Image (spheres, grey):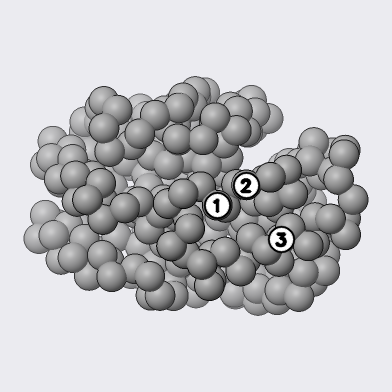
Amino acid sequence: MEWSVTAVEHWLAALEDRHLANLSRSELTRALRALSSCYVERRDRLAQGAALEGAGKRAAFALFYGPLHFLTVTCIVRALAAEQRTLREIVDLGCGTGAAGAAWALASNAKPSIAGMDRSAWAVQEANWTYRHFAVRGRAATGDITRTPWRANQRSAILLAYAVNELPPDRRALLLDRIIDRSRAGAAVLIVEPIARRGADWWDEWRAALTAEGARGDEWRFTTSLPPLLGSIAKGAGLDPRELTARTISKM
């Protein structure tokens, strides 16, 4: 998929202004390398919040992984024809910087609002900035997605984008029960995770449990040419994402 000068690139420019005001490009590059290492080699630290430790990693997440997730979820929503479902609200659990929820809301024909939730106060602040930037109706708040009450019905979608793998096993099991319950109440479900299986022993269990409820499992590879800023950041850190890849469990 090709990306032209659109709202995405204006968003990237705004992110650059926001996060590089007090950080050099070389500092960003070092932080992105450290963040990528955390995701690949030290996934056990993710549950402790290691991905967002320090201004450098937070900037790297906001400027690289957030937009990468935005582009990937946009492609997935279109591939699943999820934009055609009439939704009033997207419940974005573990919303991060709000990129994935915004991607679905912007792609959706119904233009739903977003109810975001994340344990990180910084991420919640970023998510609310993202919603304002894209003029999406929504609000993110801090909370534990396995314990804090949230609601979803037949006019809602539950989104878990790159969030389940960061939970401890006991809380992950609690969350699965809640997702199944809300799915039976008619809520749409979209769970997105990296295509690599390292550190994701839970995936097969979740896929089996949710496909028994009518969901489907997919793996995706979208050929892409990244927007220039994103490509430049990736190249500086020694990354070369020629494809947007992910695996999903979905029920629409």
Determine the image quadrant of residue 134. Answer: top right
| Quadrant in the picture for the N terminus | bottom right
| Disc marking residue 32 | 3
Residue 220 can be seen in this image: no
Up the image or down, 120 lies above or below 172; here it is above
Report helix, strand or loop for mark 3. Answer: helix
Q: Neighbour class for label 1 at 10 Å: few (<14), some, many (≥20)?
A: some
Find the distance from the CA under tag 3 to the CA under tag 1: 13 Å
| First in sequence: mark 2 vs mark 3 | 3
Cα distance between the residues tagged 1 and 2: 5 Å
Which residue sits at x=74%, y=58%? 31
- Which of the labelled discs sits on residue 50, or is there none? 1
The one nearer the camera, 193 or 44, is 44
The residue nearer to you, when weighing 141 against 250, is 141
The residues bearing labels 2 and 3 have C-alpha atoms spaced at a distance of 12 Å
Say whether residue 191 is visible: yes
Note whether 117 is above or below 194 in the view shown.
above
Question: The residue under label 3 is which amino acid type?
Answer: Leu
Question: Dot 2: few (<14), some (14–19), or many (≥20) neighbours within 10 Å?
Answer: few
Where's residue 45, x and y in %?
48, 58
Residue type highlighted by circle 2: Glu
Q: Is residue 233 above or below residue 131?
A: below
Circles 1, 2 touching at the beta carbon (< 8 Å): yes
Image point 57% across, 36% down: which residue? 123
List the residue tagged with mark 2. 53
Question: Which quadrant of the structure image shows residue 94?
Answer: top left
Residue flagged by tag 1: what amino acid is it? Ala
